[in-house]
Image: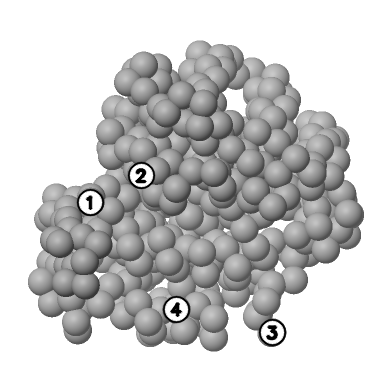
Amino acid sequence: MIRIGVIAGDGVGPEVINVSLDVLAQVARLEGLEYSLHPVDIGGERYLKTGEVLPDSAVRDLRGMDVILLGAVGHPGVPPGVLEQGILLKLRFDFQQYINLRPVRLFPGIEGPLRGKGPDDVDMIVVRENNEDLYVGAGGFLRKGTPEEVAIQTSMNTRAGVERTLRYAFDLARRRASEGPFRGLSESDRGRGLVRQVTMVAKTNVLTFAHDLWMRAFDDVGREYPDIKSDYQHVDACCMRMVVAPERFDVIVTTNMFGDIITDLGAVLQGGMGLAASGNINPERAFPSMFEPVHGSAPDIAGKGVANPLAAILSLAMMFDHLGHTGAAGRVRAAVAGLLRQPTPRTPDLGGRATTIEVGQAVQSLIASSS
């Protein structure tokens, strides 16, 4: 029995979560999977009504889950940072979800923003360290609100935290080798028996303490994977090359802060936020992992029924992968890929006029037809 905590959240969150739960029910029937849903009421509306962000009782309930599905967090009536820090960061830290995983894949049938670049060129995955760096909240204010105000925010990086992230990235590259060798490898690389590539993204020429630690750990861990090419990019160069030559990237591993930025760039390369799935992973499964679309609550379209549910559905596929149900994950991804090869139905963000529910129903029809 898979215990699934469900945080529908704010804005379009409930709309896309409801569609993904319909897909979950269908795939579970086909795969013979048993599960139970455990809704947890947290988000902007609860905060505005009760002043509670993430009660201890909610944390206890979620701790007992195998996985968590999250719709979105963010409310225009709540000050910035309250929900993000109080819900998202707290769950990531409390449940040791130290890997943030973001696939960046341009599906056939989707026209990306890069001229001359297609699905064969945009197929990478970003491994973002998720429990350290600037996000730990170390720092504070001095003389706040005065002309002499000082604000300090410290990046914290531990050898253990960095190394486990790097090792996850190299292991992931080896798993991707089952899909075939990385196209971006040179003939010389192939001749040396290399099959995949891990690119570490940092800023070693300026952040000479924290990123020196990252570089030394990267070199040490990389030596344990002689079949994987180790590559390094400064973050600014990485951003430029993701636009000019995305085919150069296979697995990217990076810090919490830089990962937050380049994954949004990656979402644009794959056709927009409506297709961008993510997982906050505890690889050991000692705590529940959390899967969510990255598009946020989108209050400007909330309640209109036109939010793209595909990112939430693809996040469901990532959940199945994490739980070891690769057949279920494959069904979901194949249906999404089949849908995107067709000109319709598509939600407005992809140039169509379909509703959230219509797109979800089309995915279910494709799953049913392939069974």
- Mark 4 or mark 1: whose residue is earlier in sequence: 1
What is the secondary structure assignment of the residue under circle 3? loop
Contact, mark 1 vs mark 2 (Cβ under 8 Å)? yes
* Residue hosting label 3: 116
Q: Quadrant of residue 256?
A: bottom left
In the displayed image of the protein, which residue is found farthest to the front?
Answer: 146
Contact, mark 2 vs mark 3 (Cβ under 8 Å)? no
Q: Nearer the viewer, mark 3 or mark 4?
A: 4
Q: Nearer the viewer, mark 2 or mark 3?
A: 2
Q: Between residues 37 and 52, which one lies in front from this camera angle?
A: 52
State how far apart marks 3 and 4 are (Cα): 18 Å
Callout 2 crowding tier (Cα within 10 Å): few <14, some 14–19, many ≥20: some
- Mark 2 or mark 3: whose residue is earlier in sequence: 2
Q: Position of residue 141 (x, y in %)?
A: 17, 58
Answer with left or right where residue 205 lies relative to residue 47: left
Q: Which mark is residue 239?
A: 4
* Residue hosting label 2: 85
What is the secondary structure assignment of the residue under circle 4? helix
Q: Nearer the viewer, mark 1 or mark 3?
A: 1
Q: Position of residue 18 (x, y in %)?
A: 69, 30
- Mark 3 or mark 4: whose residue is earlier in sequence: 3
What is the secondary structure assignment of the residue under circle 1? strand
* Residue hosting label 1: 137
Answer with left or right where residue 240 lies relative to residue 361: left
Q: Given the image, on which type of amino acid does mark 4 rest?
A: Cys
Q: Given the image, on which type of amino acid does mark 2 rest?
A: Gln
Contact, mark 4 vs mark 1 (Cβ under 8 Å)? no
Q: Position of residue 90 (x, y in %)?
A: 32, 38
Q: Quadrant of residue 219?
A: bottom left
State how far apart marks 4 and 2 are (Cα): 26 Å
- Mark 1 or mark 2: whose residue is earlier in sequence: 2
